[in-house]
């Protein structure tokens, strides 16, 4: 359900790597909670057991923010443990929007493919439980932090060459030419060199 951050037990698509750090969720992580969207809309409220991919640090620093996946959250001290490890693979909803446009039609990715970039996106048009999209810019024209790349889940690999007719490959994934949310695995990155920003 895209009105809530993903929180099922299969949220990890890889067993590692793991590099967790603690953050003050309200001060350091976005977008989550009331008023956290670019235009002041609300995202889902962070709770333990939910595992959204979020940006770390001030929105004013975009797009060079760190990104990571929430591992645990303690509402008593508003403390989140976030996995910042390079190349960890997690499951999340990804919106297929490529560009936002006022007065003109937005554009959409109709064929999600392995290796395509996804971004932490705080745009108001996205559902409350969705923090990732294919758009490098949000609906207000701000540059979105690069989160990672679409990647295989364990059961996406074509294993017909190993154990007979067991192919279950579902990539690329064809989706509608409209705003849709697809539950996929994303390989996270904090590599700015080839993304949408470069550290100087």
Image: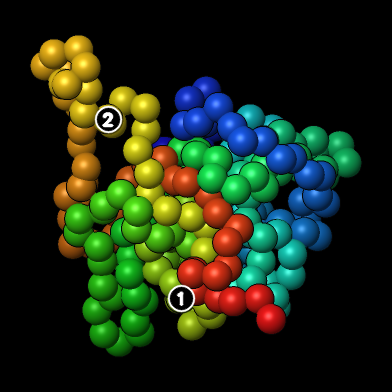
Q: 75 left or right of 167?
A: right
Q: Residues within 10 Å of mark 1 (few under 14, many from 20)?
A: many
**Where 62 falls versus 84 (above or below)?**
below
Residue shown at 63% from the left, 30% from the top: 49
> Residue 160 is drawn in which quadrant?
top left
137 or 31: nearer the eye? 137
**Where 135 falls versus 68 (above or below)?**
below
Q: Position of residue 175 (x, y in %)?
A: 20, 51
66 or 179: nearer the eye? 66
Q: Residues within 10 Å of mark 2 (few under 14, many from 20)?
A: some
Q: Position of residue 44 (x, y in %)?
A: 58, 48
193 or 169: nearer the eye? 193
Q: Nearer the viewer, mark 1 or mark 2?
A: 2
Q: 29 left or right of 119?
A: right
**Where 109 falls versus 175 (above or below)?**
below
Among the two numbered marks 1 and 2 on one chain, the one whose residue lies closer to the N terminus = 1
> Residue 159 is drawn in which quadrant?
top left
For the C terminus, the quadrant is: bottom right
| Residue at which label 2 appears | 157
| Residue at which label 1 appears | 137
For the N terminus, the quadrant is: top left
């Amino acid at each position: 359900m895209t009105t809530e951050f993903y929180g099922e037990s299969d949220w990890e698509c890889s067993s590692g790597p793991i590099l967790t750090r603690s953050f003050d969720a309200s001060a350091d992580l976005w977008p989550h909670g009331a008023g956290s969207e670019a235009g002041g809309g609300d995202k889902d409220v962070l709770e333990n057991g939910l595992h959204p991919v979020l940006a770390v640090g001030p929105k004013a620093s975009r797009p060079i923010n760190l990104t990571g996946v929430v591992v645990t959250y303690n509402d008593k001290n508003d403390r989140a443990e976030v996995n910042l490890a390079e190349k960890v693979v997690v499951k999340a909803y990804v919106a297929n929007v490529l560009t936002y446009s006022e007065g003109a039609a937005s554009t959409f990715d109709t064929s999600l493919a392995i290796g395509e970039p996804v971004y932490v996106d705080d745009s108001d048009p996205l559902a409350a439980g969705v923090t990732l999209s294919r758009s490098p810019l949000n609906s207000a024209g701000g540059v979105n932090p690069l989160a990672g790349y679409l990647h295989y889940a364990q059961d996406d690999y074509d294993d017909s060459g190993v154990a007979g007719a067991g192919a279950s490959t579902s990539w690329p994934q064809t989706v509608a030419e409209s705003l849709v949310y697809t539950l996929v695995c994303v390989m996270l990155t904090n590599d700015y060199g080839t993304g949408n920003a470069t550290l100087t």
